[in-house]
Amino acid sequence: MKIQTFIDKVGDPTLGISGKSFTVQGFGNVGYWAAKFLEKDGGKITHIIERDAAIYKADGIDVEHAKAYLIEHGSFKGYDAADEIEVKDPLSFMERPVDYLIPAATEKSIHRVNAEKIQCRAVFEGANGPTTFAGEEILNSRGIVVAPDLMVNGGGVTCSYFEWLKNIDHVSPGKMTKKFDEKS
């Protein structure tokens, strides 16, 4: 797809969050908080994708309302505040035109099969390793910027590292500082 055609589909290429559309894949801690802060700064969360259902609302999803519904029902199935709900193939919403895509749930969500179909300006990796090497090469060749998980969600990556250290040393929660002090 030509860049101008893509810009025509997704709107004004100006900088900033205000007025831009976002797809969030995964509405746990990373996805929810990213959506909440983006909405606060004027961004429109137009798509939210969960494991068993995805929702879309053209003028933006109310993040707090969606989170409350998800907590109460455990799914977006039946979410009546959306313009559209997809239950057969929720991940297909990642391929819809949007300004920015935030895969915040699972590894390898973007890969060689779907990377050619993704239509956004940039991908901000919220999950650990959501884009495969082949997927990133395809996105880059199409002019789509991929901001890596280590930069976008450094806190989550750091916590995962410490959990990994804790697990390989068989350290129970809260004792990591004591063990570190003993070793140093």
Image (cartoon, rainbow, N blue to C red):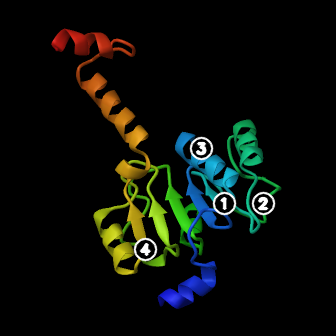
The mark closer to the camera, 3 or 2, is 3
Comes first in the chain, label 3 or label 2:
3
* Type of the residue with mark 4: Ile
Q: Bin the neighbour count of mark 1 within 10 Å (Cα to Cα): few under 14, some 14-19, many 20 and up.
A: some
Where residue 173 appears, as percent x and y from the top left, is: 39, 16
Image vertical order of residue 29 relative to residue 149, above or below = above
Secondary structure beneath disc 1? loop
**Residue at horizontal 61%, vertical 45%?**
32
Can you identify the residue that label 4 sits on?
144
Camera-side residue of 85 and 101: 101
**Residue at horizontal 55%, vertical 90%?**
5
Q: Which mark is residue 82?
A: 2
* Type of the residue with mark 3: Trp
Q: Which mark is residue 43?
A: 1
Secondary structure beneath disc 3? helix
* Type of the residue with mark 1: Gly
